[in-house]
Amino acid sequence: MITASTPCAQPPAWALKQRRLFDAMRAAAQIYLDKYTREDGTLIWATTWPDMRDGVDDFYEAFVNWPLLYLLGGDDWFLETAQREWDAITRQLTALGPVLNEYERGYDQFHQSEHYTYFYFLCLADPTHAQNVARARRFAELYVDPRAGNYDPVHKLIRAPHNGSGGPRWGFFDSEDRAWTYGDWMQPYGLPFDDVPGVNTLDDLRDPVLARRMGEATHQRYGKGDVAANLGVTSLIANAWLLTGEPRYGDWLVEYVGAWMARAEANGGLIPDNVGLSGRVGEYLDGKWYGGLYGWQWPHGFYNLAMATLVAAAAAFLATGDARYFDLPRWQMDGVWSRRAVLPLREVKRSSLGHHWVGQLVASGDSNAGHYAGRLDVQDRADESQEAPMCVVPYRHGDRGWFDYQPLSPVYPAALWNLTRSDADWARLAELRQTERYDWRQVISFRGKEDAGHEQPWLCFLQGENPDYPERILDVALEQVAQRLQSIEEDRADLTTVNIHHWQVRNPVTTEALVQLTLGAPQPIYNGGLLIAPLRYFDGQRRRPGLPPDVAALVERSEATRLVVRLVNTNSSMQREVIVQAGAFGEHRWDAAAHGARSGNIAREPIGATRFAVALPPASEIRLELTMTRNVNPPTYPTV
């Protein structure tokens, strides 16, 4: 055991703010829970399910990051409550109809992967939970076992874009009325297809005949065959593999991800977004490699395909150790980057996902750009900010070619670098920064649905350029908790009539700052991402995951084989013990640790293990320079 020997009578501001954030979220979460749930844990909502397939994810997303906060060091209450809420919402949705055998009956994996991250965090937080282990197996078998109906092992494809515990959910609509009726929500995204006769604009859908025509096309083209967005399911299989170690789950990942890699390679690297039941790309789209559900053409394009390929690469790599899988997301990023352009802000601020790249829009000379970018209804401003040049890439591709130019969000290359820690992937980030026209060091107070978006200033901090970033991002996180709490307290809505997004926009738990600062990693990919980080902590005294009470952690450097970590015990009377693990899944090995001794000399100690313990006497701190060898152990969900 290494013992901290540096007195810390006055803890640094970042350490105090970090512990304050844990406390603030615990208090706010109780208020949120009391407001929006019944005594049995179910969400206060309507008693009947509307005629739609959508919505299951939004119920679970009300608590999606609560077990992650526990994993970081949040109160025991977060795990207990997160498990209770998962079980209660599952019962609620089963009674309402869209959940069957505790798993979603059938919907697209873009949406399913949003809320099943909740389940993966639960499994990582307590891998001995017998009911969750049984669920993980049962959920994975829906795809690994061909008898469940979802997977075709001959053609190596998932048989429908909508899939789940009910098997393939054929078609796009359940009702006979298959009209694709106009809705204001479509405005940022436009039409799903360019070739439906008579339907040239969204306004054409106001005509019931044309709406029916578009609906029929959607029902046929989106109703069967595999789509690239189904790669989001790979984390479901990886979760079962990490829990059980059963080879058949790893074998399935190799087979399924490998099939999509082959299709992408045959298409010049860009992943085709659809494949028919015969195994032919473009089978239901006149041979087009684009046009599948949640594919290149509609609605989000690169946004969701980048996430799906990153998730798939991570899952396949964990199961095999084969780094070639990282080429799949690389090909997509390089494909759009090679088509980049420089356009004025006025031409791109209304793009389909403007509200997602708010954190990038601090254009030259316009510090307010980041705040108004997310408002799609903002009025044009007759000043120079509208002409601020921006480097953008095409997110979507249709019959007219590439379109929907937006900034390349650093979320994707940062997630890739976090997976590989390779110089080549860091170079992608460096090139992006060099090309951008704004200061990456700026910290803007905002919080999107993904609880991410501050990768730029954090990456600068890791390079030693942004020394006050920890305090600034913690201030942002505390501000966001306060804003969510105010929104909860001011909410007077009739909860039995609210829409399915009502809770998630008020969830006061935010984890991005804590993941970055304590783990030296970006926030997990929202659509299905596992927790990938170079290290993780356990409380040596309470024998549970996460930082002990009163302990703050800061990863100051996070490189391929070297990390610099500060640990501070803010308690002036109690000793704490921190177990430091190499890798979120124990996949790495610590080689050595260097730290300052009381005499001022540097002590260097060999470790040669996946974990080591640090004793933190009252009011003490330690700065550890750690070296590691990566990916030498089989990854698993470890216990203390």
Image (cartoon, grey):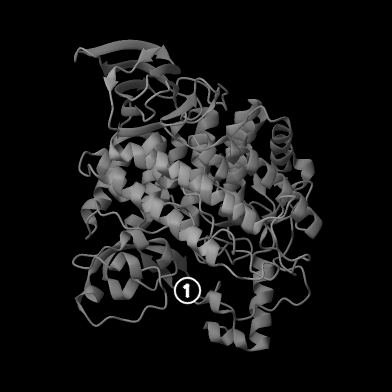
Horizontal side, residue 182 vs residue 578: left or right = right
Classify mark 1: helix, strand or loop.
loop
Residue 198 visible? The answer is no
Front one among 21 and 167: 21
Q: Quadrant of the C terminus?
A: top right
Front one among 20 and 167: 20
Where residue 403 sits, quadrant-wise, is bottom left
Q: What residue lies at 60% left-to-right and 56% top-to-bottom? A: 111
Residue 443 visible? The answer is yes
Q: Amino acid at mark 1?
A: Pro
Query: Does 477 sit above or below residue 602?
Result: below
Q: Residue furthest bottom?
A: 207
Front one among 553 and 90: 553
Mark 1 Cα within 10 Å, few/some/many (few <14, many 20+)? some
Q: What residue lies at 37% left-to-right and 22% top-to-bottom? A: 618
Provide the residue designation for mark 1: 188
Horizontal side, residue 606 vs residue 175: left or right = left
Where residue 38 sits, quadrant-wise, is bottom right
- Residue 87 horizontal/vertical position (percent): 72, 45
- Residue 442 horizontal/vertical position (percent): 25, 54
Q: What residue lies at 53% left-to-right and 35% top-to-bottom? A: 316
Q: What residue lies at 76% left-to-right and 68% top-to-bottom? A: 174
Query: Does 434 sit above or below residue 318?
Result: below
- Residue 361 horizontal/vertical position (percent): 30, 63
